[in-house]
Amino acid sequence: MLQLSQNALKVLRARYLLKNERGEVVETPEQMFHRVATHVASSEDLYGGDRAYWQERFYDIMTSLRFLPNSPTLMNAGKELGQLAACFVLPVEDSMKSIFDTLKHAALILQSGGGTGFSFSRLRPKSDIVKSTGGIASGPVSFMKIYNTATEVIKQGGARRGANMGILRVDHPDILEFVRAKMDREELTNFNISVAITDEFMEALKRDGYYNLINPRTGQMVGRLKAREVFNEMVRCAWLTGDPGLVFIDRINRDNPTPHLGRIESTNPCGEQPLLPYEACVLGSINLSKFVLNPITDNPDNTPTIDYQRLRDDIYTAVRFLDDCIDASRYPLEEIERMHKGNRKIGLGVMGWADMLVMLGVQYNSRRGFRLAEEVMGFIQKTSKEASQRLAEERGVFPNFKGSIYDRPGMPKVRNATTTTIAPTGTLSIIADCSSGIEPYFALAYKRYVLDTELPEVNRYFFKLAKLMGFYSPELEREVIRKGNLRGVKGVPTKVKKLFKTALEIPPDDHIEMQASFQRHTDNAVSKTINLPRSAKPEDVERAFLLAYEKGCKGITVFRYGSRKRGTLVRFDDTY
């Protein structure tokens, strides 16, 4: 039987359940999951699969809240729109036609609930010559502002706010203008921005040297900048506003599974899904809080374990579900359909990680916590590849297999070019009533806002454990709800305080260590916010940026608490 929290019901009614022309909800949550399971399982007909059997399996894994697909699948499956993927990247070439064709294509994607990433690195720099008119170019940032305005208009009619990622290579001549682009809080409000950092830049930074700026129109060097000065500006702006983030573009391309099709230049809005131009990816997340046997939150004397057998079974089902989504989806552009069906990228990730750790009695930022992250994600990675191999035996390898990294002796024959991604799972985790992505608890009690709906969150595990261990009192509950954390709260055992550390109590180094632990066993990338306290200095941001590169992360986003007013920060963690 489907059991949903009050917050889950609020979110489902606001965004996911079908409505009539008067805006009245005309679908129950059970009917929504049935709609999704029925539509996705229809793909089984293409391969001779047992449609009724898989429809039942898909319905069960969703209604038990053990797995949920990305939001567009829940919203659009079985409807006329029918677009099921969350992540898209579109190319922006150096011509007025390309710039505005891409904007038109982005509008179709945003209208369907997808998030779009763009690299503006191919656009000629500001003040460069425009030969066809004799004028001068206005540069990448000017066109980003046009895209931002269009997004503002498009999102008014959508179920989700428009989400864009704008990326510029660090060696573009306009890099400093780009880095400072969100210092004006009224600008680029529908964009996250990230700098594509090259290994060459990091080497120049290491030796305190200069690096070359390249005009993308000519391919010629047009100047040099001191790496340290550019890096300091990135640090300063990120410290003040949360932007830019960094993506380590050469590292991303070393893991590009289809290098014969081109280089990856951009990611989706939250940075966890690097994609080729016109590529899409459908995401889904396993709710890890559903796979703990004998949790300490049921009995503090329990010896909890992870139910790996059930997790294995559900990974196989989830991979099949996501692969079926690729065929069940309707695509806004032929180019996107061709690329997505050609590479068949899927991104299976997790949510409920903080919950799982609490249920196991493991501190988030501890050696055991980091080891467990590698163990769990390593298992998901290995099993998802086995599931993809089985699908390849049934259905064939992905069409662009020849020339891919799998096309060599000893490599598996797989159905999907990638199988794993760690997404933020903002609203999905509300529906599943679990912690989001791989993040620690933001607070033990707080209010979150989704489409202007206020959702009070109170950590049920802490108060349940407090009652079981005998230190609960109404006064304690009032104090914890008021403060949101356990710092200075008397009467709470030290081991419980360690277990329920909140995001701002965890050092940035440990946030990055957790991200790196998951990244080691993830095909694509990992969405993780590196939380910094309000008192953090720019040097703390610098350390975080350098440590993320050193630890093998594919990107990094930092956010210093209080650096922006609520509501102005565009970190689209409610879009997946």
Image (cartoon, rainbow, N blue to C red):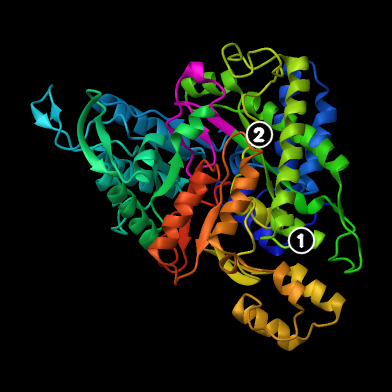
Mark 2: secondary structure: loop
Relative depth, front residue between 93 and 25 = 93
Which numbered tag is attached to residue 362? 1
Relative depth, front residue between 425 and 101 = 425
Which numbered tag is attached to residue 78? 2
Residue at the location (71% across, 86% down)?
A: 490
- 92 left or right, relative to 294: left
Identity, as a three-letter code, of the amino acid under mark 1: Val
Where residue 205 sits, quadrant-wise, is top left
Total number of numbered labels?
A: 2
Identity, as a three-letter code, of the amino acid under mark 2: Gly
Where residue 505 sits, quadrant-wise, is bottom right
Residue 314, position as x, y percentages in the image? 80, 38
- 288 left or right, relative to 182: right
Residue 254, position as x, y percentages in the image? 52, 28
Instruction: Examine the rendering and report whether any part of residue 270 can be seen.
Output: no
> Which label's residue is closer to the chain start, 1 or 2?
2
